[in-house]
Image (spheres, grey):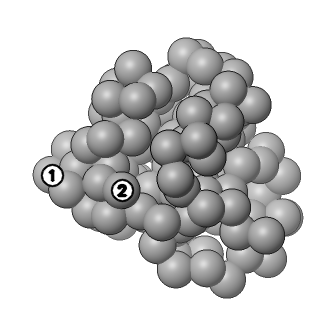
């Protein structure tokens, strides 16, 4: 599924990386625990989190994750957006809960990591 479709399904807003909306995504992982994110070794991964801070961007960078959705009306700061842009990441803000966000994406055919 293209990220453009993900944004439409979730009525979400792209705050960084709009040029990457045609990128494909196959797997989704939802977590607020960045220690759990560090254990994932799946390519083409979309991360859903409610943890909106620089640590999320740095953890994603270390884990080669370039696609992040901030759920629960969380907003990326200017510093997060700058760091994401430096690393060619796409940041998406979504008003839905992590549960609803995950459910919509699962129902639409995206796969869980495990």
Name the residue rendered at 46%, 72% in the picture. 44
Please state if 77 lies on the left or on the right of 7 as rendered. right
Number of the label disc, if any, that sits on residue 19? 1
Depth check: give the residue in front, 42 or 114: 114
**Along the line of sight, which residue is nearer the eye, 80 or 100?**
100
Q: Is residue 8 visible?
A: yes
Look at the numbered disc 1 and give the secondary structure of its residue. Answer: helix
Residue drawn at (33%, 49%) of the image = 3
Residue position for label 2: 1
Q: Residue 10 in the image: x percent, y percent?
A: 45, 27
Q: Could you say which quadrant of the image residue 58 lies in?
A: bottom right
Residue 55 seen anywhere in this rendered image of the structure: no
Label 1 Cα neighbours within 10 Å, binned few <14 / some 14-19 / many ≥20 = few
Residue 88 versus residue 77 in the image, above or below:
below
Q: Nearer the viewer, residue 110 or 15?
A: 110
In the depicted structure, whether residue 7 falls above or below residue 111: above
Asked if labels 2 and 1 touch by Cβ distance under 8 angstroms, the answer is no
Callout in the foreground (1, 2) = 2
The x and y percentages for residue 65 are 51, 68
- Which numbered dot is residue 113? none
């Amino acid at each position: 599924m293209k990220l453009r479709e993900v944004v439409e399904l979730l009525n979400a807003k792209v705050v960084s990386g709009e040029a990457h909306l045609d990128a494909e995504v196959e797997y989704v992982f939802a977590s607020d625990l960045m220690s759990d994110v560090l254990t994932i070794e799946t390519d083409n991964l979309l991360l859903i989190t409610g943890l909106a801070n620089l640590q999320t961007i740095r953890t994603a960078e270390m884990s080669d994750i370039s696609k992040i959705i901030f759920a629960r009306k969380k907003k990326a700061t200017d510093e997060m957006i700058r760091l994401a842009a430096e690393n060619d990441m796409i940041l998406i803000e979504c008003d839905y809960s992590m549960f609803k966000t995950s459910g919509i994406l699962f129902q639409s055919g995206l796969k869980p990591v495990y």
